[in-house]
Amino acid sequence: MKNNIVAEISVSYSYAAEPSERTKVRTSMEAYKLFKAHWNMDLIELQEHCSMLLLNPAADVLGIYNLSKGGTNNTIVDARLVFGIALKTNAAALIFCHNHPSGRLRPSLKDIELTKKFKKAAELLDIQLTDHLIITKEAYYSFADNGNL
């Protein structure tokens, strides 16, 4: 007789900060500063990395999730992972962020396509894609501020 193996999956998420203690993110500059404070600055010019901020309806930060690390000029971001995490944390809004090790702030065609894809997927789930930032040590590019969202 063949044994059927079924995996048990347990998902847990807890809020470490009380609502009154949570950081608010209302502007691209606030998001940039928060991402930069949690970025490994030793790798920002070496390896592409993508993270996302998870926000509640009041723009309070629920958390930062490191989505992927790649090579010197790209990284892969899995939509199922992005939206699985967003749903598990009950996020109302997301802000994506990735770096360009080259130091160039202009979005690539892949950056633009990915942003459009994720915006469309987020809308289906009633989640707002608030912004997508490209960061360097000294500056950032905001898709929202530049009318590309």
Image (spheres, helix red, strand yellow):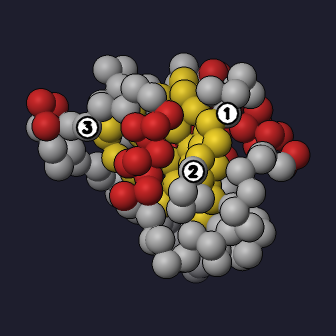
**Tag in front: 1 or 2:** 2
Q: Which residue is tagged 2?
A: 139
Q: Are marks 1 and 2 in contact (CB under 8 Å)?
A: no
Q: Which residue is tagged 1?
A: 143
Disc 2 to disc 3, C-alpha distance: 21 Å
At 72% from the left and 76% from the top, the residue drawn is: 71
Q: Which mark is residue 67?
A: none
At 80% from the left and 40% from the top, the residue drawn is: 112
**Furthest residue to the front?**
138
**Tag in front: 2 or 3:** 2
Q: Earlier in the sequence, mark 2 or mark 3?
A: 3
Q: Which residue is tagged 3?
A: 23
Location of the C terminus (image quadrant): top right
Give coordinates of residue 116: x percent, y percent: 76, 32
At 38% from the left and 60% from the top, the residue drawn is: 38
At 53% from the left and 62% from the top, the residue drawn is: 137
Q: Earlier in the sequence, mark 1 or mark 3?
A: 3
The type of residue carrying mark 1 is: Phe
Q: Are marks 1 and 3 in contact (CB under 8 Å)?
A: no
Q: Is residue 92 visible?
A: yes
The type of residue carrying mark 2 is: Ala
Location of the N terminus (image quadrant): bottom right
Disc 1 to disc 2, C-alpha distance: 14 Å
Question: Residue 144 falls in which quadrant of the image?
Answer: top right
Q: SS for tag 2?
A: loop
Question: Residue 4 falls in which quadrant of the image?
Answer: bottom right
Q: SS for tag 3?
A: loop
Q: SS for tag 1?
A: loop
Observer-nearest of 40 and 138: 138
How packed is label 2: few (under 14 Cα within 10 Å), some, or many (20 or more)?
A: few
The type of residue carrying mark 3 is: Thr
Give coordinates of residue 46: x percent, y percent: 64, 78
